[in-house]
Image (tube, rainbow, N blue to C red):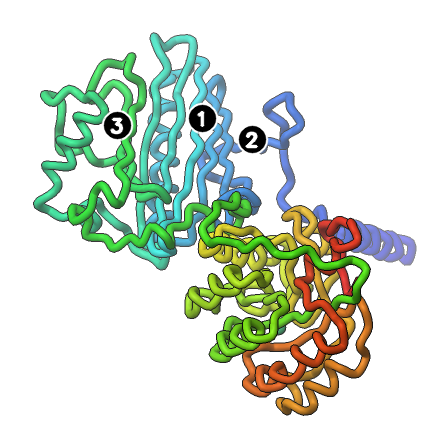
Amino acid sequence: MREKLLQKKYLFIVVLMIAMMSIFCGCGGPEQQETATPDDEAVTVFEEYISEIERYETPDGIFREENRYVMVDGDFKADIVYPVTGNEGVDREILSYVQHAVSRYNREAGGNIAELTMKYEGYIVNKQYMGVKMTGVFDGPFMAHPEDILKTFNGMADGGIVKIGDVIAAESREELIEMTADATGADHSLIDDGFLDNWNLTGRGLEITLERGKYGPMSDGTRSVLFTYAELGSRMTADIDTRKTIRNETTEQITAPADKVTVPELQRPDPDKPMIALTFDDGPGAYTDRLLDIFQEHGGQATFFLLGNKIDKRPETVQRMIEEGHEVAGHSWSHKELTKLTDKEIRSQLVKTNNKINELTGLTPVIMRPPYGSYNDNVRAVAKKLGLSAINWNVDTLDWKYKDADYVYDAAMKKLKDGNIILFHDIHPTTVDAMEQVIPALIEEGYQLVTVSQLLTADGSEIVPGALYYNR
Ligand code: ZN
């Protein structure tokens, strides 16, 4: 009896240990039952449609996550990647479409070897509209030719479904059909009510796609036409500011520079003379233009670490910075402490800001200042990938704290040294007041007032992506 009790107790402990081990090793999630394909990619085999879905974040997608649905039923195989957009209506439509497509093509395969594959493209336009275009192929040796699959979904970014009648004026519908038919070479006699069914607002314009074989010969393939927003003009009822168009908000690569603002040829600083970099954070603000006036009067350049979400309020000020030879760089989009964010969020904070600067000036900064100077290995890794290095400071004027021009002046002039990077905030009038004295005083002391990039490269050094600088 006692032995049996002990055995029971022992069994309980073993079970408990196994349970704990599986918790600690993080393998307590849904088990993957079988591997259906020979490649390394884990593919879960499902007994029933949509019984389980492989769900993962999409580092390169525009939506929060995407699902991969893989089903093997005898000789029929479906492999479908579709997004979770966050718009409930659109997500419901997509899921229902995927389910129906799987059962319909499985039925059509009728026990023959066949494969259904689908992927998608996603669009977010103006932060207002979002769309998904799913394309795919259904194919098998029993078929005369593969069947192309096409289906689009559209909604408002913050919820709700959007129909083409919501973006194109009713009286322009016929004209749009004509324009589409002409551009795609569609057979006019085949045009039906569903002719404009597959459309998306994209970063460049309205795209209309025609199913293969439906409005022309199969040999034409799937045809699409893109009408730019400018081209559509008043035919559009949707207000699309193309300058604000984003195709890929969170993961867009930093756009290539395109010259928009004339950048003056700056005199290279004399490497043998002392130099200091004055840096201004959190702007552009209400006093920034006055600060630019002071620089104009006395000479010298500065570096402005801007908040991305403030740039649209004062675009002329930012352009003026560039035109007058100052350096413009990012200080995150919304002053979030980057060390507390996920990699994806860090990336978004940095990329959005740089893209905003690029949009306005044609320049792409290679340096940035992390809010609060907070930097760690995560932030470093993201910054490095983006080709950005981080700039902190070795002289803090505490101008934000004391808001006193004399205090700021003393703090800036106290530890004068060649290679200093001094921190100010141009959003405080007292700081700009202080600069009336600081700028001429530094020049008087023999310092060249240079941008951070000039300071770090004056001796021929290169700025290293991912590296953190405090001074030179
Ligand atoms: Zn700041």
* Mark toward the start of the polypeptide (1 vs 3): 1
Crowd rating for badge 3 (residues with CA inside 10 Å; few <14, some 14–19, many 20+): many
Mark 1, secondary structure of its residue: strand
Q: Between 328 and 334, which is closer to the camera in this rendering?
A: 328
Q: Where on the picture, by quarter, is residue 149? A: top left
Is the shortest distance between ligand 1 and the CB of mark 1 under 8 Å? Answer: no
Q: Which residue is mark 1?
A: 117
Residue 425 image offset from top left, x and y in percent:
61, 77
The Cα atoms of the two marked residues, 2 and 3, are separated by 33 Å
Residue at the spot 20% in from the left edge and 47% down from the top edge? 233
Residue at the spot 37% in from the left edge and 41% down from the top edge? 132
Of circles 2 and 1, the one toward us is: 1
Q: Which mark is residue 45?
A: 2
345 relative position to 285: left or right:
right
Q: Which mark is residue 210?
A: 3
Looking at numbered disc 1 in the image, what kind of residue is underneath it?
A: Thr
455 relative position to 128: left or right:
right
Q: Is label 1 in contact with label 3 (beta carbons under 8 Å)? A: no
The Cα atoms of the two marked residues, 2 and 1, are separated by 15 Å
